[in-house]
Image (tube, rainbow, N blue to C red):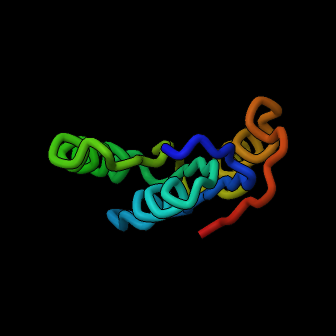
């Protein structure tokens, strides 16, 4: 670490990522650029459970690997659980202080 403070704050939200590890790659890339980034992945419960196991194995082999927060939600319930979960992530006052960008992938 070079001691510089992060000047950009980004929130990534991935809907239905499945077994794609794009968020982990982006977290690692942004952290090397001294960007404060937080990533969330919303997917079906069975996918989240399986992916969590996979990411745990990756973390054992590569401890420096950054991981998104996995959230199980019924992606078919757009007006219910998906909307509520997105509102919680996006509107959370504890995290939204000074967020420069929010990306949904």
30 vs 64: above or below: below
Q: Residue 64 versus residue 52: which sits nearer the camera?
A: 64
User: Quarter-wise, where is residue 63 in the image?
Assistant: top left
Q: Residue 36 versus residue 6: which sits nearer the camera?
A: 6
Q: Residue at x 77, y 60 (%)?
A: 101
Q: Is residue 95 left or right of residue 2?
A: right
Q: Residue at x 61, y 51 (%)?
A: 37
Q: Is residue 27 left or right of residue 4?
A: left
Q: Is residue 72 left or right of residue 18?
A: right
Residue 50 appears in the figure: yes
Q: Residue 23 versus residue 77: which sits nearer the camera?
A: 23
Which quarter of the figure is the C terminus placed in? bottom right
Relative image position of residue 35 (x, y in whole percent): 62, 54
14 vs 105: above or below: above
Q: Residue at x 22, y 48 (%)?
A: 62
**Residue found at the far top of this picture:** 94
Residue 17 appears in the figure: no
């Amino acid at each position: 670490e070079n001691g510089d403070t992060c000047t950009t704050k980004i929130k990534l939200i991935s809907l239905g990522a499945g077994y794609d590890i794009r968020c982990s790659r982006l977290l690692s890339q942004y952290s090397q650029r001294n960007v404060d980034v937080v990533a969330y992945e919303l997917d079906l419960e069975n996918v989240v459970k399986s992916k969590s196991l996979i990411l745990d194995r990756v973390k054992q082999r590569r401890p420096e690997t950054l991981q998104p927060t996995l959230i199980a939600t019924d992606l078919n319930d757009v007006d219910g659980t998906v909307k509520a979960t997105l509102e919680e992530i996006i509107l959370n006052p504890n995290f939204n202080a000074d967020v420069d960008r929010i990306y949904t992938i």
